[in-house]
Amino acid sequence: MSADITLRVPTKEDGNAVHKLIGRCPPLDTNSMYCNLLQCAHFAETSVAALMDGELVGFVSGYIVPGREDTLFIWQVAVGEQARGQGLAGKMLAAIVDREQCRSVRFMETTITEDNAASWALFGRFAKRRDAELGSSVMFDEQAHFGGEHASEMLVRIGPFAAGAEVRAAS
């Protein structure tokens, strides 16, 4: 990386900065500030904050899917403009999956709209580095679930990961 970036578990104090970062990262859907505070408090062990010179420049929120301890769902991936082009998003995903708290995780899921080329590329690279399959299907339909107000969200499922496998360095 061209700049020194530190990855760490987020804290409640990061919630406001997370909210502002996501607001600067279209096409991400913004959640309420309260939601971002909960992500940093309740889902901290399955999320990651990236800091450069003390400023939050990246955030990934995720959680273990209830009833499926082997599946990590990635809610959002945000990288600020000043930290793009350095492979940070992939490194943040790896940082979560490789934590002790995620030792049972063998699958990663997320949702992506069909037109979000950057996210498809990110998760495609992640699957390749994990030597894992990537599959997709409609999770939330544009008409049935969003009433025509939002594009369909495709469920992307990556895995299985080999037990204890670590991601090769992002390139």
Image: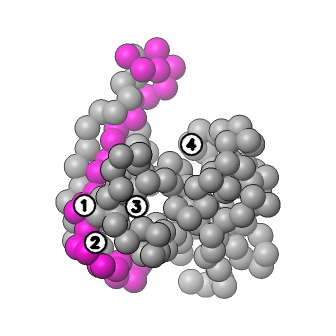
Residue underneath mark 2: 130
Which of the numbered marks, if any, corresponds to residue 159? 1
Left or right of 151? Residue 33 is right
Mark 3 vs 2: CB contact within 8 A: no
| Inter-mark Cα distance, 3 to 1 | 15 Å
Front position in the image: 126 or 74: 74
Q: Callout 2: 10 Å neighbours few (<14), some, many (20+)?
A: some
Left or right of 16? Residue 170 is left
Give the residue type that dot 3 points to.
Leu
Residue underneath mark 4: 27
Q: In what element is the residue under mark 2?
A: loop
Which of the numbered marks, if any, corresponds to residue 142? none
> Residue 15 in the image: x percent, y percent?
74, 54
Q: Is residue 66 visible?
A: yes
Q: Residue at x 68, y 56 (%)?
A: 41
Which is in the foreground here, disc 3 or disc 1? 1
Q: Quadrant of the N terminus?
A: bottom right
Give the residue type that dot 1 points to.
Gly
Q: Which residue is drawn at 75% across and 58% down?
A: 12
> Residue 129 in the image: x percent, y percent?
30, 73
Mark 3 vs 4: CB contact within 8 A: no
Instruction: Say whether disc 3 or disc 4 marks the residue closer to the N-terminus.
Output: 4
Mark 4 vs 2: CB contact within 8 A: no
Q: Which residue lies furthest to the front in this view?
A: 67
85 is within the stretch colored magenta: no
Q: Callout 4: 10 Å neighbours few (<14), some, many (20+)?
A: few
Magenta highlight range: 144-171
Instruction: Say whether disc 4 or disc 1 marks the residue closer to the N-terminus.
Output: 4
Which of the numbered marks, if any, corresponds to residue 122? 3
